[in-house]
């Protein structure tokens, strides 16, 4: 394809053009997809054929790393390039309600009011949703969470998916993250932990949730992908860009004032520093597909730390 047409949205299939527009992606993302992610999709399809059952694909990456974009792209490729039935889910749509998090804040620790860390998701609902999609014997309602109002969308407004499905993609910043040793929890990693969690109740509760509830969920995932940031330092800038993107989507809306300010973003990401750094250190050697990002969120390299060989069901 001539270079002059490579980055031309008009030369792409309609579904790909719609995807670029919906995700507010530059036309050059087509080349990124072609180089890095189309071979990934092809290999996952082959693995699914060998397994003879729906494949669950988990994507890990810190905030702003491109997890939701990759999940959407894989769904698009599975459906339109390979003719498979596919769905992309986000762990963000399984957050507990404000009322449920307020109860945790009152009973356990105030920091649990802030959504995001393990313990603030409805893991049981996630497990039931994945099981229903894999089982394929009845329609499955897909939860949705409205970050603007900080509450789940009413259940009667959830969309219903009718299995069977071939590919299930789920993404989340903490997906796959293992628990930490008790000794590691003793020292705070930032001012927020030092000032607001001096007795370690919050971080110990979060760690226990990983052990008791999140690790069993991880066992349902067949293939793991990680978009690895170079360090935690760039997360603030990446998360701020996400808020600016949200502000553009909510322009002229009464909800625009729910977009976080730079100061609110800094406090927000401090809640995730411990597990983000832990993930960056421990997950690369555990995943099947590792993509190393640079400071500009461009892919610098890729590797396959663990082999993926799925047996037939």
Image (cartoon, rainbow, N blue to C red):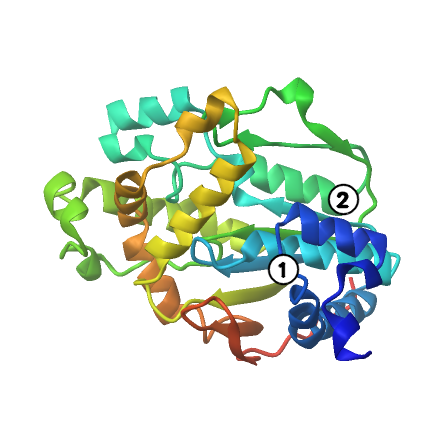
Q: Position of residue 60 (x, y in %)?
A: 50, 59
Please give the name of the residue rendered at 33% of the width and 54% of the height, measured from the top-left corner.
Answer: 236
* 270 is higher (above) or lower (below) than 161: below
Front residue of 104/241: it is: 241
Q: Secondary structure at mark 1?
A: loop
Q: Position of residue 55 (x, y in %)?
A: 72, 58
Residue denoted by label 2:
135
Crowding around mark 1 (Cα neighbors within 10 Å: few <14, some 14 to 19, many 20+) is: few
Front residue of 270/95: it is: 270
Q: Quadrant of the C terminus?
A: bottom right
Please give the name of the residue rendered at 82% of the width and 36% of the height, measured from the top-left corner.
Answer: 162
Q: Position of residue 22 (x, y in %)?
A: 67, 46
Q: Please indicate whether residue 130 sits to the left or right of residue 269 in the image.
A: right
Marks 2 and 1, the one that precedes in the sequence: 1
Would you say residue 299 is visible in this rendering?
yes
Residue denoted by label 1:
26
* 148 is higher (above) or lower (below) than 137: above
Name the image quarter holding residue 186. Answer: bottom left
Q: Residue furthest front?
A: 4
Q: Nearer the viewer, mark 2 or mark 1?
A: 1
């Amino acid at each position: 394809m001539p270079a002059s047409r490579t980055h031309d949205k008009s030369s792409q299939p309609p579904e790909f053009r719609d995807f670029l527009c919906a995700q507010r992606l530059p036309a050059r993302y087509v080349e990124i997809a072609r180089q890095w992610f189309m071979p990934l999709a092809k290999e996952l399809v082959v693995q699914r054929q060998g397994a003879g059952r729906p494949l669950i694909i988990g994507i890990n990456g810190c905030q702003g790393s491109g997890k939701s974009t990759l999940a959407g792209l894989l769904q698009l490729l599975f459906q339109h390039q390979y003719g498979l039935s596919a769905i992309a889910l986000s762990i963000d749509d399984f957050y507990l309600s404000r009322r449920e998090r307020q109860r945790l804040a009152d009973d356990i620790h105030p920091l649990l009011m802030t959504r995001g860390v393990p313990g603030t998701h409805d893991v049981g609902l996630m497990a039931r949703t994945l099981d229903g999609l894999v089982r394929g014997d009845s329609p499955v309602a897909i939860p949705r969470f409205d970050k603007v109002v900080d509450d789940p969308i009413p259940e009667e407004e959830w969309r219903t998916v009718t299995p069977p499905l071939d590919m299930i993609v789920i993404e989340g910043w903490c997906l796959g993250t293992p628990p930490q040793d008790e000794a590691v929890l003793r020292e705070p990693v930032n001012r927020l932990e030092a000032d607001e969690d001096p007795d370690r109740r919050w971080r110990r509760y979060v760690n226990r949730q990983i052990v008791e509830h999140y690790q069993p969920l991880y066992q349902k995932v067949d293939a793991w992908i990680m978009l690895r940031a170079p360090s935690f330092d760039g997360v603030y800038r990446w998360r701020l860009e996400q808020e600016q993107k949200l502000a553009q989507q909510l322009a002229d809306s009464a909800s625009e004032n729910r977009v976080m300010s730079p100061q609110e973003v800094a406090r927000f990401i401090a809640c995730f520093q411990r597990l983000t750094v832990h993930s960056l250190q421990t997950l690369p050697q555990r995943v099947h597909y590792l993509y190393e990002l640079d400071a500009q969120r461009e892919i610098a390299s890729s590797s396959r730390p663990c082999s993926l060989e799925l047996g037939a069901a």
